[in-house]
Amino acid sequence: MAVYVDDVEPAVSYQIEFKAGRSNTIVLSEEEFAIAKLLMQKSKQRIADLTTDLVDERSRLERLNVAIAQHKRLPLELLREIFLFSASNNTYPPKPTVPWTLRHVCSSWREIILSEVSIWNDVVLDHPLFQKDCERLNFWIDATISTLHPLSICIDTSYRYDTFSTQIAHSSVIVPLGPHIHTLSIDAYRDFFSLSAGFLPSLQRLSIHNIDDSFFLGGWNSSHRPTCFIDMGSLRSLHLSFSTLQRRVYVPELPFHQLTSLMITTDAEYAGLQPSDALGILRRCPLLEDCQLYLTMPKEMIPQVDPVHLSHLSELKLKLGLNQWFLDNLITPVLEKIEIEDGSVVELSPVLANVAELVLRSECSLYSVEDQSRTVSGKPNLISSRALDALSSVTELFAFEANFYTDEIVAKIASGELLPHIERSILDATGQAAIRSLTEMIERRSGTAEPHVDIHVKIDEALAGDCRAFIEDCLRRVKACGSELCVSDGNIEISQYYV
């Protein structure tokens, strides 16, 4: 006799589901077993139906959300301004181009994107869609080149560098857009350097990466010079990044005299500019405002020469490499920030002392000093009161790897006798006495106009375990003042475990 689900008595259904279904001892009869199978099939069908309904309802909800989307009610003028804001690139090199995404949303958005030329001011071409991007850009260029605004172009082939990509970039982007480009970031290739003089009249910022010195500098002769730099009258910012840099740098065509920003760096660990070449370049940069240079290890000490006056230089970043004497050849009256990059190697005389002499000689007011240099022996140099006294205007001091602060020096910092305006610093000190002095300084300054202080103290590893209660107390006192005190043994941050 056939059994139908609809004919099942409620009591039988209850017996199967809530009695047998909750017990491991109740065994169903043959008839009850058949009914249970039917009830399972019905439940599975209901779940399938509900799943289908759920998918349908979600699709319906998405369509209704599109129907009532508020952006559809925005005036075209306001939508255009939003697109302009989203497409603006304040980073350098610029991030991937927004318009290529926006133009695929709908026909009205596509019309706005293609009609508003300034939205395309920042263009990024990168792998793996490099060739497709160039084709898209070509299509757009043909329609708008007569009304182009100044353009920012970033051609990124770092994903997979090959000559095919650079040839496409050169013929599809650089050549047709040359007169309109004001910012350009590219990997080095010979055809670019062979561009005719004056081909990039509007270029203001240029960044060239992966330069081989034999290809770019040493490979040029009197009959074949990099003509692209000639009559580049608008150029103000130049970044040359070398994959290797062992040869002497001499490129008279480079318009150093008009630059306000200069970076010459290398990926090779011990490579860089010859110090004498670097000084020669700086002499040709009277308008320089910020500068970053990587220097190579010198083969011999170069005697001090007439100082290079950099009257407008406010930020300086150097990788010295046994060349701390290089600072002794500079005069920088408006210097505000200096950074000595990791990789410099010093011995006996700390770079901070050279920085102090630079400040005294230039009569400038530094506010930020970062010294990541290290000694050959690995033992830090003692910092003198004279060096810190010359840095009285500094508010940020990060000088620790090659610099050691005695308890006496730290006490003078804490009392305000040295570094009276310090707000953020990393100190390599002996430990408990230094922490006590800095904690008291932070408490004294908590009610002043400059209450916030962020200090990082490196202490001896053995001492860290002996004074846990003391460190915990100091950390709590500093936290109550709204400031920060980070304590580490050079390997781990102890404070994060203590509080």
Image (tube, rainbow, N blue to C red):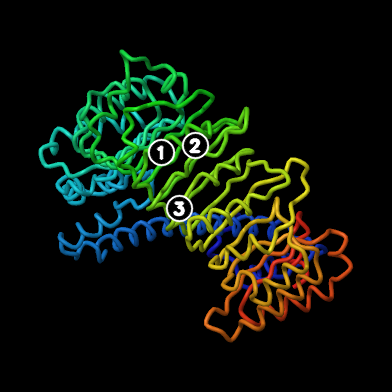
CB of mark 1 within 8 Å of CB of mark 3? no
Residue at the image position 33 percent from the left and 51 percent from the top = 89
CB of mark 2 within 8 Å of CB of mark 1? yes
Indicate which disc residue 265 carries: 2
Q: Secondary structure at mark 3?
A: loop
Neighbours of disc 1 within 10 Å: few (<14), some (14-19), many (20+): some
Q: Residue lying at the far left in this picture: please name it.
A: 146
Left or right: 355 as drawn, with respect to 279: right
Indicate which disc residue 332 carries: 3
Going by the numbered disc 3, the residue's amino acid type is Thr
- Determine whether 166 is above or below 327 in the image: above
Going by the numbered disc 1, the residue's amino acid type is His
Residue at the image position 72 percent from the left and 79 percent from the top = 476
Residue indicated by mark 1: 239
Q: Secondary structure at mark 1?
A: strand
- Quarter of the picture containing the N terminus is bottom right
Neighbours of disc 2 within 10 Å: few (<14), some (14-19), many (20+): many
- Quarter of the picture containing the C terminus is bottom right
